[in-house]
Amino acid sequence: MRGVLLLALIAVVVLAATGVWNPFPGVWDWVDRSEPISEPDVAWQQRVGGTPKSVTFAGDAVVVEQRTRVEARALSTGSQLWERKADWAAVAGADRDSVIVVGKLLVKGYEVLDPTTGVTRRRDDDAVAVWTYRNLLLDARCTQPTDCTLSAWDPRGTAPLWTAFLPGVGSGLFADNPGLRGTRRLTANRIEDGVAGPEPVPPLLGFPVDGRVHVVDTATGAVLQNVEPGREERLSVVGGRLLRITARSQDDSCYFTISGRDPATGQEAWRRAGINVRTADKAGCVQREDPQGARNVLIGVAPDAREAVLDGYDGRLLWVGAERERLIAVDDRYALVRAGDQRSVVARGLGTDRVLWSRPASGKAGASLTPYAAVLADEKPNRLVALDPRTGRELAVLRTSANALAVGPTGMIVGEGREIGYVPFSGTAGAPAPTGGRPGSGPGPGTGPTSGTGPGSDDDRCGPKRELCPDES
């Protein structure tokens, strides 16, 4: 028997060496075959070169950022389109107008790549930091530590739309999307923080420089304010306002006051006291974090421990939870709330008392709101569910322990380890929020709320101040 097996092995080796018949690739493919990462199975499943740092839809391509490389794969098949070395990568633009911005750590400059071909569309050799949005790309370059220029570009443009001068960009502002003074998103297990992809640029951005905050109008590039916070203050730019958040320590507690100011004049537009926006560090009341929220809204806790959502522009209470209800996801249209009985998730339209939909979920369910779908991640059993955020209609239901990596107009990318897969949505996904006609075309200095377009109205896709819709003029 040993002799027969030896002769058979020699015969197979000879046949493989002469090219007559080679079973070894098929055997290796069988050994290396990946188990499906979900049930039902995904449309396609591929193993990438390393554990993804981020995954983003870019038109007909899927961009996978890894530790030292970036690659693009065809949305239809998952096959690799191109790959190149890069220490960081980010997507700017929307749908088929998307581009990929790549660079190296501690090296000035970046390249703007076509998502489908990987061809360089534009190259910069001086920028130290880049910020990417659905309708704008910002970069900062410094001739000296205290002399920097901020430039705005159309994602596929070749000339800057405007430039602004800043006295430095601060330490730690380098590579892609360094932190600015805004809001912190709610997070959830098994749902990546960047699952929604690039967002529309806010009307105002707050750049921290040497302990001060420089407020820049993203439509014109004008630097509207250069403000130094007080000893008990935290500055944040939300919904077209400069927020001055004061946390005062007294009786072993923190007492909060929020003042929303017009960025052009500095005058106070609204004020609220007693709402804890979770910026302070325990009883010392040292504010080390931005307030939680998303886009034009921020989240706080009332004195009676009920959670609330505030409009950053005018300070209105858009939603106040009931006892034991917990907010798990929010944007400026909807709020997803874990019910007090810990047995369901409820969707509400902000600014109204309407319950849009409700579905059973465990007390550990997490969620995220994107322009195209609301994503729920549940445990015991493990589930990933994509829903139309307005109606609650199921777009995809998966039995899987994988993570939700990216959500796009036609489906979502899920992944576990080095395996990623594409899950197409059934029917049509939720309508995306429009990118707007011009960058920052929202609540600017001196503008007031637009009647009839608040959250929960028929036109709530535009945001509470129509900041995501084109200028009607």
Image (tube, helix red, strand yellow):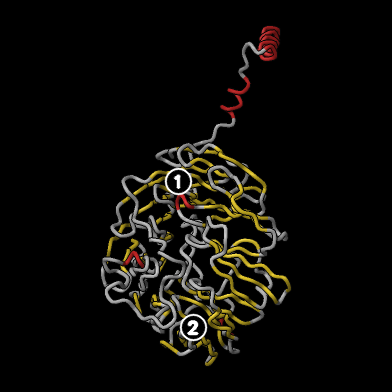
Percent x, y for residue 28?
Answer: 61, 26
Q: Nearer the viewer, mark 2 or mark 1?
A: 2
- Front residue of 87/288: it is 87
State which quarter of the image contains the N terminus. top right
Q: Which label number is shown at residue 372?
A: none
Instruction: Name, please, the residue furthest toward the bottom.
Output: 250
Looking at the rendering, which quadrant does residue 350 occupy?
Answer: bottom left
Q: Is residue 389 visible?
A: yes
Looking at the rendering, which quadrant does residue 321 occupy?
Answer: bottom left
Residue type at tag 2:
Pro
Which residue is drawn at the image coordinates 48% and 47% (left, top)? Answer: 414
Q: Is there CB contact under 8 Å for labels 2 and 1?
A: no
- Front residue of 181/46: it is 181
Q: Which label number is shown at residue 263?
A: 2
Percent x, y for residue 223?
Answer: 55, 79
The CA distance from mark 2 to mark 1 is 47 Å
Callout 2 crowding tier (Cα within 10 Å): few <14, some 14–19, many ≥20: many
State which quarter of the image contains the C terminus. bottom left
Left or right for 95, reference 320: right
Q: Is residue 5 visible?
A: no
Residue type at tag 1:
Thr
Q: Which label number is shown at residue 400?
A: 1
Location of residue 215 with respect to 365 vertically, above or below: below
Which residue is drawn at the image coordinates 65% and 73% (left, top)? Answer: 169
Counting residues from the start of the chain, the first of labels 2 and 1 encountered is 2
Which residue is drawn at the image coordinates 67% and 69% (left, top)? Answer: 172
- Front residue of 219/191: it is 219
